[in-house]
Image (cartoon, rainbow, N blue to C red):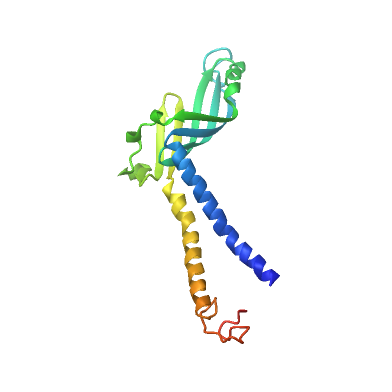
Amino acid sequence: MRSQDWRDRLRRAPVAACVLVTALIAALWFLSSIRCFALNHARGSVARNTQTPDGQMGAWEFTMTTRSVQTGPHWLRLVRAEYLSIMSTESEKNRFDSQLGWKATSFPRSGIRNDWYPWVDLADMTRGRWRFLGLGPGLMVGGAQTARMFDIPYWLPMVVLATPVLFAIVRQRRQARRAREGGCLKCGYPLGPEMIRCPECGSER
């Protein structure tokens, strides 16, 4: 009986986790409609340009690569961006030290233009730029910075996580109906009051 209780708890644990994560996503969706958040990680690398003498502009190249997770009014955005800075000496990279590492920021929702990210746009599928119900990749190029992103609408993980919860609810209601009718909880075979094991599937009563 105790082993059966542990099996029931292990069976319910994934469903409880799905409910918890779905509630967290819903709360994040609500908060992002007021203010957006971002978690960034930046690292830098230095490369020597042998074709330019040291001390002249272009002798060194500093590439800062950032990976971030951003929340938006309707989506969760994964971003990978690269920023190239041309320097004359290697020591000039020190001005980027404060931007490296982990950093959490927030910004108002008004800073995001919704017309940049339509819900449906299949015109540029051949170039890898498409959107369908808020899901899709994007590319932003400006100056020395290139940013590639992928948007995941909040509704998508909520639907995925809610599916096992709905199956668990249906299973629970089916077992409750079979228990009221005096049948086996697993297969529904009608059991007599003296039966301890189901003769159809072999499960204990």
Which image quarter is the N terminus in? bottom right
Q: Position of residue 40 (x, y in %)?
A: 54, 32
**What residue lies at 61% left-to-right and 86% top-to-bottom?**
195
Above or below for 154 versus 181: above
Q: Position of residue 169 (x, y in %)?
A: 49, 64
Is 28 left, or right, of 48 in this rendering? left
**What residue lies at 49% left-to-right and 33% top-to-bottom?**
37
Judging depth in this view, the residue of 23 and 194 nearest the camera is: 194
Is 54 left, or right, of 107 in this rendering? right
Judging depth in this view, the residue of 84 and 197 nearest the camera is: 197
Is 46 left, or right, of 119 in this rendering? right
Q: Is residue 12 visible?
A: yes
Picture quadrant of residue 54? top right
Q: Hey, which residue is sitting farthest left in the picture? A: 123
Picture quadrant of residue 3? bottom right
**What residue lies at 40% left-to-right and 41% top-to-bottom?**
74
Which image quarter is the C terminus in? bottom right
Q: Position of residue 139 (x, y in %)?
A: 40, 35
Q: How many marks?
A: 0
**What residue lies at 52% left-to-right and 29% top-to-bottom?**
105
Q: Position of residue 145 (x, y in %)?
A: 46, 27
Q: Hey, which residue is sitting farthest top in the picture? A: 55
Q: Is residue 72 visible?
A: no
Judging depth in this view, the residue of 12 and 106 nearest the camera is: 12
